[in-house]
Amino acid sequence: MTINVNPVADIITPLPKQLLIDGKFVPSLSGKTFKTFNPATGQVLAEVSEGDAADIDLAVAAAQRAFNGPWSRFTPFQRQALLLRFADLVEKHFETLAHIDVLDMGAPITSMYARRQRALGLPRFYAGMCTVIAGGTLPNSMPGEVFTYTLKEPVGVVGAITPWNAPLTSTIWKIAPVLATGCTMVLKPAEDAPLTALRLGELLLEAGVPEGVVNIVPGFGHIAGDALARHMDVDKVAFTGSDVTGRKVIEASKSNIKRVTLELGGKSPDIIFADCDMDAAVAGAGMGVFANTGQICCAGTRLLIQRPIYEEFVSRVADYAKSLKVGNGLDPATQIGPVVNAKQLDRVSGYMEIGLGEGVTAATGGKRITEGALKDGYFFEPTVLSGVTNDMRIAQEEIFGPVAAAIPFDTLEEAAAIANDTVFGLGGGVWTSNVTTAHRIAKAIRAGTVWINNYGGLDPVVPFGGYKTSGYGRESGVEHLDAYLETKSVVLKLG
């Protein structure tokens, strides 16, 4: 891939940077703005209108009007056609959308191109689901002649709050079930990467989404996000982010006992048995940690390695980490980009100090990159830590950076015990050539998804979500739509 233009000026300048409310891009009522930065350079990309509680009020009111207006009379076929038009527009503008993510949060352009199938597959999957949402008839044992049936109805106004680590796919993942079920929404994108969501808002209007059906209010979590989660006229909140913020969302939702689905953090185990295909496991487990610079909620950051191959595997995965090219995401050769901002860089660096204080050894990495062309960005070396025990903070707490903690184990039972010895339960991985081992350990891991001889792949048909403090509810799959639908029972006495 060759870039023949100035990508920052040509891509960022024409983007909308105001709030999308009731079908129009408007400034915030306060007139305030905030800056979003390019993490590869530390330079300002854009100033974006800063929404607050008053703007959330306007957006929710618009979503309510839309829910009770013509949108409520859209047929399943019409909603399906709308989603398909939106998918076609995402496909048409995919390269621009991919570059916005690169500039706003640092993902390598090659990894963004690899997400093309997911970005297009999500809206098309939910388009297919539009026409299968249905209730049913029920056998009723009440005396007399009784006809009983159920209806599936949209829950109402949805407040969606998305993270910064995958703006394009995370935003589509929140929008698509809303449109499929006939709900309306107010979306609060992460303040560190709001530009992709605003561009998707333009595409939604172009696709023909009625005014007020999708509203987008950038702003800060503790102000705009909190107002959205507490709002009395929001019927459901769909949140993706940290478990710390997830608890605040739960607390805020008590205002009107609104529905909540949460996809939160993780400290996922990736279990490598001695009989694994070593070459595949090194590369697969390595990118299970380092993909997206470790900024993935289900990243397999705890490498549980069977003791006979522990030293060899740590050495080989460290060599693999050293081979990865760290750089600006606009460079097609880059495999690992920056972390999203200076605060996150400080967090990752702080955990290195904690780990070294706990007695671990850095087999590779462990430092911020402070020299050369990358010195002004938020870059951290891909890191492999050895000598880790599962009670250490670096093994228990989510770092959200390119850091792998290598922990030895002896037996399958011990591996399962270590895997489950965490407050999280979002994902897990297994590398083995023994199908019996694979099924036994997959059943033993208490997590929402277990990958066997691969790691991290997602498909719209496969439910995704967590156990324990990794959240509740599922996204993707037919289960996802249940969270956006009410079930109404109708009991009709005949005669």
Image (cartoon, rainbow, N blue to C red):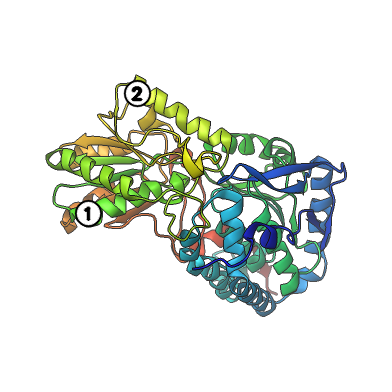
Q: Is residue 9 left or right of residue 362?
A: right
Residue 475, given in percent of the width and then of the height, sits at 52, 56
Residue that mark 1 sits on? 438
Residue 366, given in percent of the width and then of the height, sits at 38, 33
Indicate whether 82 appears above or below 190: below
Mark 1 neighbour class, 10 Å CA radius: few under 14, some 14 to 19, many 20 or more: many
Q: Earlier in the sequence, mark 1 or mark 2?
A: 2
Say what secondary structure mark 1 lies in: helix
> How many numbered marks does the figure carry?
2
Residue that mark 2 sits on? 356
Residue 199, given in percent of the width and then of the height, sits at 69, 62
Furthest residue toward front:
372
Q: Nearer the viewer, residue 52 or 26?
A: 26
Q: Residue 9: in sight, yes or no?
A: yes
Q: Nearer the viewer, residue 431 or 491?
A: 431
Residue 166, given in percent of the width and then of the height, sits at 54, 53
State the residue at coordinates (62%, 34%).
Answer: 248
Q: Is residue 228 left or right of residue 39?
A: right
Q: Amino acid at mark 1?
A: Ala
Q: Is residue 245 left or right of residue 478?
A: right
On the image, which quarter does residue 424 sit in? top left
Disc 1 vs disc 2: which is toward the camera?
A: 2
